[in-house]
Image (cartoon, rainbow, N blue to C red):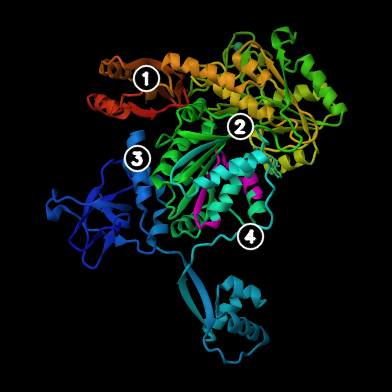
Amino acid sequence: MTNTVFRAQDRVKVLVPRPFDNAFDYLVPEGMQVVSGAYVQVPFGRNQLVGVVWGAGEDTLPAHKCKALLQHCEHVPPMPKALRGFIDWVADYTMAPRGMVLKMALPLPVALLQPPMQKLYQLASAEASMPSATRERVAEVLRERTQMSPALLADAAETSQSTLRQMVKDGQLIETHQVMAPPVQHFNITKRPDLSDDQEQAAALLAQQLEAGFAATLIDGVTGSGKTEVYFDTIEKALAAGGQVLVMLPEIALTVQWRARFAKRFGGEAMVWHSSVGEAERKHAWRAVASGSAKLVVGARSALFLPYNNLSLIVVDEEHEASYKQEDGVIYHARDMAVVRAAQEKIPIQLVSATPTLETIHNVQQGKYTRVHLPSRFAEASFPTVELIDMREAGLNATQWISPELGQALAKTFNAGHQAMLFLNRRGYAPLVLCRTCGHRFQCPRCSTWMVLHKGKSRLQCHHCDYQQMAPTACPECDSTDSLVPCGPGVERLAEEAADLFPQANIALLSSDQSQDTAEMIQQIIDKEYDLVIGTQLIAKGHHFPHLATVGVVDADLGLSGGDLRASERTYQLLHQIAGRAGREKVAGYVYLQTYQPEHPVMCAMQAGARDDFMALEAEQRELGGWPPYGRLAALLLDGPREAEVMRTAQMLVQHAPQDAAVSILGPAPAPLSKLRNQYRFRILVRTDRHIHLQKMLKQWLAVVKLPSAVRLKVDIDPYHFL
Ligand code: ADP
Ligand code: ZN
Ligand code: ZN
């Protein structure tokens, strides 16, 4: 099907990256011709914006009111139809304005308005003789290469760019400007691993899917079972067939290791796309994807919105990771949207995890996804032994967190010359500072949370809004100078305790507060320069520490509290992931979970290695309550500067809620984080049967209520974060 061409005097709809759901009508001016998907610059209010032609316009607006397109960005291919359809779909599903979804798919306007230019030098005359040896060298290089950029030419002729500029002035060189070609990826595969039988079987099935349209597959297997090797195999086949491949990773930090591994296997670099990639690099990457010269993109959520011209495979690694849910701006779940994108592109998608989510398992059981299973770790490594330590019987005082049993296990590990790790998901020194005399607690002035003590930096810090102050020396209530006590442990404090217990041990402390280079420290851990690694979430993910034998989880219960419907599931996933760090090579792994609830299903499942039983139990409970994936869920979050007003608004919303037996409204209730950055927050949960069209219902409901201007409403479809 060819794209409709719009000519002068035709009207087109243009979607602009602003918070509007509708595209606006514009007139195609004389001498211009555009197709659907074309990037165009348009007058918008007092501004000029770059938007996208979304289709034919309507004749409802009088001609003199319809403004004309200003510029057609001809040097970039139009936005592919599949991406436009995807933007429409995401906007409808998330209930975000279409323009805001488009915004995620646009590079900076400069990248669209002007093609990137490159300065090149060439000889004014090929035969002319040069007055000096240096200039003769320049001429020689150019006789062979015809034209070169100043930097490369200066390098090749062993001279300076100022000499080259002088040669331009003297009429010996000519300066030209040309459109820069987008960078091209080259791969050079020299050796591929021999797959095990299980891996081979999985790879064969995945290969079949490459030519067969949409198919979603879960690659399920413990860490180290070779999931990555298996999807690398499909990637190789997809690339060989000339397609583009998108690999999504949950965290930017992971891409470094992943890229190194990819480069080794494929003999070429992956193209990286995430929010911290610099502007210049983004511009090139975006063009390379649009032109098709970029073949493999590895990226975070936003890589889903790139204008691939020939996408043939999507891989979502660590599909269970909560960070796939974007919480700011357009609220969407990148794993779910990736499946939608694959369906629209009619290509296969692979979801990869050692601990798949209940949603994904449910989809497998419903027959919507296929599952391939890699049951065992590659080569001799096996999953570590997990032991529970009942903290009710540990007999610790209020400033100790390492139980005698864990202490002994660590000592044994060090004596054997192995490495150990302690995990605690709490940054800083102590989560709370308290005055023993008057009971004063240090709270963030802007949020309903305690300030966390960072002893290294001598600061109190709010981990929600980043408000900071100097660590106090006296109580602001009662002026006592020696009555302030830190309560509870953070990793800094845990490191202190460990250093007391094991003065000989070389300890690495890893958290996002660290000033040292994390990548460097991780290399040192791999090289066994440390005996003990202490860290937060940062160390749980993806790293391969070959010498690590023992892992201690200081507070295994930490994620279980709070009203999050996925608290158990997530705790299980995290504990499993941490446990998977131990015993990855020749040494056997041991994992110790310190818990006050050893009878909790999560702890029992961890000890028994009974993931499927645990997930079945979770599923049963969710089904009983009508929670996702058995029912639909949306959260309405209201916030504003005046608590009473926000509460009244939330109550008024609930009063207008639809009366339907298939719809339950929970709340309003203050959000667990009831104040954040001086905004008071109330939450309403909307749970419906699966047959209800949730978005349609919400749209009708929300259309009849008028919010006060100071109160904001955020709609979160499929909420994952319940703070
Ligand atoms: P996962 O992605 O499931 O954690 P990986 O693919 O990272 O597993 O494999 C774990 C380790 O085993 C890696 O070091 C990997 O290189 C190695 N490995 C896996 N499969 C093979 C194979 N067929 N041949 C050689 N090494 C393999
Ligand atoms: Zn006090
Ligand atoms: Zn705060």
* Mark positioned earlier in the residue sequence (2 or 3): 3
Q: Which residue is mark 2?
A: 354
Q: Position of residue 631 (x, y in %)?
A: 39, 21
* Mark positioned earlier in the residue sequence (3 or 1): 3
Secondary structure state at the residue bearing disc 3: helix
Alpha-carbon neighbours of circle 3 within 10 Å: few (<14), some, or many (≥20)? some
Secondary structure state at the residue bearing disc 1: strand
Q: Which residue is mark 3?
A: 89
Q: Position of residue 510 (x, y in %)?
A: 69, 33
* Mark positioned earlier in the residue sequence (4 or 3): 3
Instruction: Decide which of 423, 438 is in the foreground and name it.
Output: 423
* Mark positioned earlier in the residue sequence (4 or 1): 4
Q: Position of residue 407 (x, y in %)?
A: 80, 19
User: What amino acid type should be assigned to the residue bearing mark 3?
Assistant: Trp
> How many marks are shown on the rendered structure?
4
Secondary structure state at the residue bearing disc 4: loop
**In the drawing, does residue 82 fall left or right of residue 245?**
left
* Residue 98 vertical position relative to residue 385 in the rendered view, above or below: below
Q: Nearer the viewer, mark 2 or mark 3?
A: 2
User: What amino acid type should be assigned to the residue bearing mark 1?
Assistant: Arg
User: What amino acid type should be assigned to the residue bearing mark 2?
Assistant: Ala
Q: Which residue is mark 4?
A: 188
* Mark positioned earlier in the residue sequence (2 or 4): 4
Q: Nearer the viewer, mark 1 or mark 2?
A: 2
Residue 522, labelled with which disc?
none
